[in-house]
Structures are given as C-alpha cells and as structure tokens.
Amino acid sequence: MKKLLFAIAGLCTGFAFLLSSCSKPEEGASSSNEIKPGKALLSIRMTDAPGNFNAVYVDVQGVEIKGPQIGTLNLPVNAGIYNLLDFVNGTDTLIAGGPVPAGKIEQVRVILGPNNSVVVDSVTYPLSTPSAQQSGLKLQVHRDFSAGVAYVVLLDFDAQQSIVQTGNGRYILKPVIRVVDQAVSGAIAGSIVPDSVICTITASDGTNLFGSFSDSTGGFIIPAVPAGNYTVVVAPPAPWIGDTIQNVNVTNGQVTNVGAVNL
C-alpha cells in the first residue's frame, strides 16, 4: 500500500537558511526547502498494498491537518486522480505538503472528489464514497512535531480491504488506511554570548553543509539536519573570535542543543 509521508522541517529562531541538503528537494506540493521561523516542513505521501483489481482510482482534492495550536490548516495539494495500484511494493507518491507551525497534529483529513472508480475484469465501476466526499477521510495521528525536525508520515492504503462489493453489483469505498510516521531529520540549536553579535553558524558532516544565523536574542537553530555526527562552526564578524564544536550528534526527531557559545 502507499504511504503518506509527512516531512517536517523548520525550527528557526533567527534568519535561518539551508545552505545545502543531502538530497534534492522533491517536486510537488512540498518541493520548497525554505525554512521559515517557527515552521516545520510537512510532506504527505501515499502508498498502497496490492489488490485483486485492474485499477483503483481515487480523486484526491484536498488535505487538511488539525491540532490544538494550529487549528485547521489546508496544505498545498497535488490534486488529481491516482491509481493506487501504481504505488505498491514500496513505491509511494507525494500528495500534499508545505510549511506548517510546530506543535501537535491530531488529525489528517484527506478530501476526495467524486471521480473514484475501480476496474474489475477490464470493466470500470464507480466507487461510492459518501462519507469521504462530505467530511473527508479522517486519520488520527496525535504526534508532536518539533520545528526544525523533518518527519515522514506514510498513509498505507489497503485497496483490497477498502473496496466492498454490494449485493447489487455496486462497489463502495470504505478506506482502510494504516498511518506510519517517522522523523527523518533532527536539528541543532544553541545561543551566542554576547547576544548582540550576529553570527553565522554552520554544521558539516564532511559531505553536507547546513547553516543558519543567530538572531537578536543570540539564539540560533539549524533545521532539517539528517542524523549523524557534525562539526559546528560559529563565525562572528571581526574582531570577535568564534568557536568550533566537534562531535555534535544529531538524532532524527530531536533537537540537539550545544548550549551557549562564548565569543
């Protein structure tokens, strides 16, 4: 089945920027890798398990997320009709994503349009989806997303179990979806003393380089850093002398705080 991945990246206390990334941004709803202050970057992906059908078409028209801090937020969506059977055996596709406020996300709602159908023995039948069309497919997540951390939430759509044939030859879509979410990056945070000096902060693992600036309070965060071991360099303007911090371990889903850096 296809999996929806929520990739969240973006805790910034200053004018944070991503100098480089370990992978090319994916085209689509969340193709931008710009990290905005206080934001995370959320990508939603869809996958499917094989089913005994020629094709299963679902008409994705919208995706919403809900949480106590963010309320209801509509995500940029790659609207269109998707054949679920194109996304089996580990294949998935991006259906929605974009910058979101950090905080708790309790629910994802996938809104379907009217053009849903199933192909059985080369014959196409419409799929009735009354509840999905009226209020959307409501999927419970209940996860705290930290700004500056990248997450993946995968919706694994079970086509075989989701399609019910009625006694009169009609087919009804009653989605059975497994939600899989994981953190796919971490972040590095700290502070500068004195806080009036605006510094450039970079983190490198020898191959990739990520960076940010300290803000007017001295705080800084480098968001969307993949797990690994990094060297952090604090570079202030002259005549200040910076510092280098070795062996900064980043764990997916966590913000590693290097503490106060005294210039």
Image (cartoon, rainbow, N blue to C red):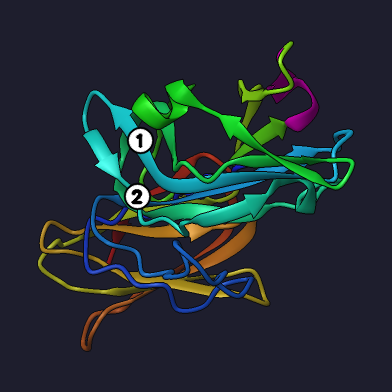
Report helix, strand or loop for mark 1: strand
Compared across the picture, whether 92 is left or right of 174 comes to right
Q: Amino acid at mark 1?
A: Ile
Q: Nearer the viewer, residue 49 or 221?
A: 49
Q: Is residue 54 visible?
A: yes
Q: Quadrant of the N terminus?
A: top right
Compared across the picture, whether 208 is left or right of 186 comes to right
Q: Residue furthest bottom?
A: 238
User: Do the residues bearing badges 2 and 1 touch, measured as CB atoms within 8 Å?
Assistant: yes
Tell me what residue is drawn at x 19 percent, y 73 percent. Answer: 198
Q: Reading the chain from its start, which is encountered first: label 2 or label 1?
A: 1
Compared across the picture, whether 94 is left or right of 166 comes to left
Q: Position of residue 163 (x, y in %)?
A: 71, 25
Tell me what residue is drawn at x 45 percent, y 27 percent. Answer: 132
Q: Quadrant of the C terminus?
A: bottom left
Q: Amino acid at mark 2?
A: Leu
Identify the residue position indicated by label 2 in the image: 75
Rounded to the nearest angstrom, the CA distance separating label 2 from label 1 is 8 Å
At label 2, counting other C-alpha atoms closer than 10 Å, the crowd grade (few under 14, some 14-19, many 20 or more) is many
Task: Read off the magenta span.
Answer: 159-166
Q: Indicate whether 194 appears above or below 204.
A: above
Q: Position of residue 121 (x, y in %)?
A: 89, 41
Identify the residue position indicated by label 1 in the image: 65
Would residue 161 be counted in the magenta stretch? Answer: yes
